[in-house]
Image (tube, rainbow, N blue to C red):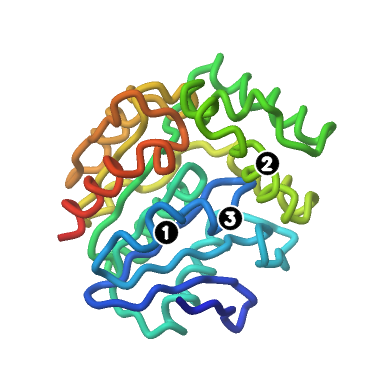
């Protein structure tokens, strides 16, 4: 395993293997560590990195947009000498992946959108607005968030999960994290989806209340070369709780 940072300060970990590399993009408030259940499970080279303003990667831009995150990823894969990649994005990572695929489709071998929001209704939008305001005030992870991300059964069997996820949040510069979180909250699904031509796997948890199965199915109508996978009994962080099923789906997709 290799740890490193590129010339722009993007921190990454790399497990060098064979084949087209798989790049994993984490969700808001988290970092590369959430991909631990995926890191050694593929025959391909695997890279997980910290997005701007998260983990060990600084946020240098004051005028932030999803284009900044695509440029960050482009710089990383160029410096790692990767011509084409399999790209896997989770939550806000899936929005970064959508932006990247729209602009740099020719660099992708495949795209996986995991727990991707799409066209929130008025009630769903108000809920995320309220959570964002709460985060600005409390500057900490609510235990209620874990109940959205994991089933009660998983939390009961893994009592340390709150501390593990909280420690990831606490590694962030809070001001930078909130700037990125605001992008997620205000996202308008205004990508030019017709430009995404690469084969795409759209996957979410059956019980995910934030990026629902209905959202994934609707998103699939806009991305032509896509398939939908719903993880039975999965919530938002199904990549951890239902890692075997998620990993199997990604393996089938990238091979």
Residue in the picture at 29% in, 44% down: 244
The CA distance from mark 3 to mark 1 is: 10 Å
Please identify, in this view, whether the residue under mark 2 or under mark 1 is nearer the observer.
2
Q: Earlier in the sequence, mark 2 or mark 1?
A: 1
- Residue at label 1? 24
**Which numbered disc covers residue 71?**
none
- Element assignment for label 1: strand
> The residue tagged with tag 3: helix, strand or loop?
loop
Direction from residue 162 to residue 218 in the image, left or right? left
Q: Is residue 8 visible?
A: yes
The x, y position of residue 1, in whole percent, is 45, 76
User: Looking at this view, is 7 or 99 the one in front?
Assistant: 7
**In terms of depth relative to the viewer, which is nearer, 65 or 7?**
7
Structural crowding at the residue carrying mark 3, measured as other residues with C-alpha within 10 Å and reported as few (<14), some (14–19) or many (≥20) = many
Residue count near mark 2 (Cα–Cα under 10 Å), binned few <14, some 14–19, many ≥20: few
In which quadrant of the rendered view does residue 22 lie?
A: bottom left
Label 2 belongs to which residue? 163
Q: Which mark is residue 31?
A: 3
Residue at horizontal 46 percent and vertical 54 percent from the top = 35
Residue sitting nearer the eye, 97 or 104: 97
Q: In the picture shown, does residue 92 fall above or below 83?
A: above
Circles 3 and 1 in contact, beta carbons < 8 Å: no
């Amino acid at each position: 395993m290799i740890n490193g940072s590129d010339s722009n300060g993007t921190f990454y970990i790399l497990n060098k293997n064979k084949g087209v590399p798989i790049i994993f993009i984490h969700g808001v408030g988290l970092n590369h560590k959430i991909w631990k259940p995926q890191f050694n499970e593929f025959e391909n080279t695997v890279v997980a990195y910290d997005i701007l303003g998260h983990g060990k990667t600084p946020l240098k831009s004051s005028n932030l947009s999803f284009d900044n995150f695509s440029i960050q990823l482009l710089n990383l894969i160029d410096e790692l000498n990767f011509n084409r990649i399999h790209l896997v994005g989770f939550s806000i990572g899936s929005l970064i992946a959508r932006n990247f695929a729209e602009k740099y489709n020719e660099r992708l071998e495949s795209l996986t959108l995991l727990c991707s929001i799409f066209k929130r209704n008025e009630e769903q939008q108000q809920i995320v607005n309220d959570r964002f305001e709460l985060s600005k005030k409390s500057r900490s992870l609510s235990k209620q968030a874990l109940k959205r991300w994991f089933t009660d059964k998983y939390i009961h069997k893994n009592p340390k999960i709150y501390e593990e996820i909280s420690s990831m949040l606490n590694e962030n510069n809070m001001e930078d994290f909130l700037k990125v979180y605001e992008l997620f909250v205000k996202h308008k699904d205004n990508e030019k989806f017709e430009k995404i031509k690469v084969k795409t796997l759209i996957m979410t948890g059956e019980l995910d209340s934030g990026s629902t199965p209905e959202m994934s199915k609707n998103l699939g109508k806009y991305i032509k070369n896509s398939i939908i996978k719903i993880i039975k009994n999965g919530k938002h962080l199904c990549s951890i709780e239902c890692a075997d099923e998620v990993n199997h789906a990604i393996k089938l997709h990238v091979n």
